Amino acid sequence: HSDLLDILAQGGLIGVALFGYGLWRIGRYTQKRFRDRPPGALSDGLVAHFHWIAVSCIAALPVVAFNPIMLQPGKAFILWMNLGILLGLAMRCDSCPSPKKPD
């Protein structure tokens, strides 16, 4: 009835811990990179997309916890695609050079 219960049944506590750790790492990396981004690293439009995707990923976690989303490939694809886009935007924050300060 739930993806977390499926992971628990098939992978045990280690499986659930690894799944949770992976999601936690993605969230932590994204939050840190977005917070520490240099000014102008993302346009206003990309910042708006970043926030929308982050909120949709956070909203998807309870859905995944209580519904078998992973058994429905179309819905699972949307969840993992959103996480991938979120990571891509976070990596873009990393790759932009910091503006040089005038002497």
Image (cartoon, grey):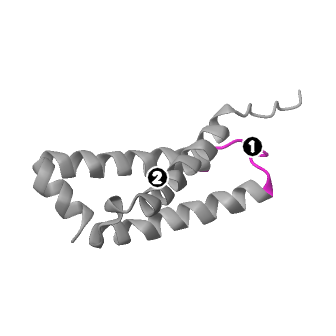
Q: Quadrant of residue 88?
A: top right
Residue 89 is situated, as x and y percent measured from the top left of the image, at 63, 46
Residue 22 is situated, as x and y percent measured from the top left of the image, at 34, 45
Q: Which mark is residue 80?
A: 2
5 up-or-down from 96: above or below: below
Q: Is residue 88 visible?
A: yes
6 up-or-down from 102: above or below: below
Mark 1: few/some/many CA within 10 Å (<14, 14-19, 20+)? some
Q: Which residue is pictured at 30% across the width and 71% down the height?
A: 67
**Depth order, front residue of 38/56:** 56
**Depth order, front residue of 80/16:** 80
Mark 2: few/some/many CA within 10 Å (<14, 14-19, 20+)? few
Q: Quadrant of the C terminus?
A: top right
Q: Nearer the viewer, mark 2 or mark 1?
A: 2
In the rendered structure, which segment of residues is drawn in magenta? 35-44
Q: Which mark is residue 4?
A: none
Tell me if 5 is positioned left or right of 90 in this view: left
51 part of magenta stretch: no
- Circles 2 and 1: CB distance less than 8 Å? no
Q: Which residue is mark 1?
A: 41
**Depth order, front residue of 87/74:** 74
Q: Say which amino acid is labelled 1.
A: Ala
Q: Which residue is pictured at 56% across the width and 51% down the height?
A: 86
37 part of magenta stretch: yes
SS for tag 2? helix
Q: Say which amino acid is labelled 2.
A: Trp
Residue 58 is situated, as x and y percent measured from the top left of the image, at 45, 65
Q: Which residue is pictured at 66% across the width and 39% down the height?
A: 92
In terms of sequence position, does the residue under pointer 2 or pointer 1 come before the other? 1
Q: Quadrant of the N terminus?
A: bottom left
Q: Quadrant of residue 46?
A: bottom right
SS for tag 1? loop
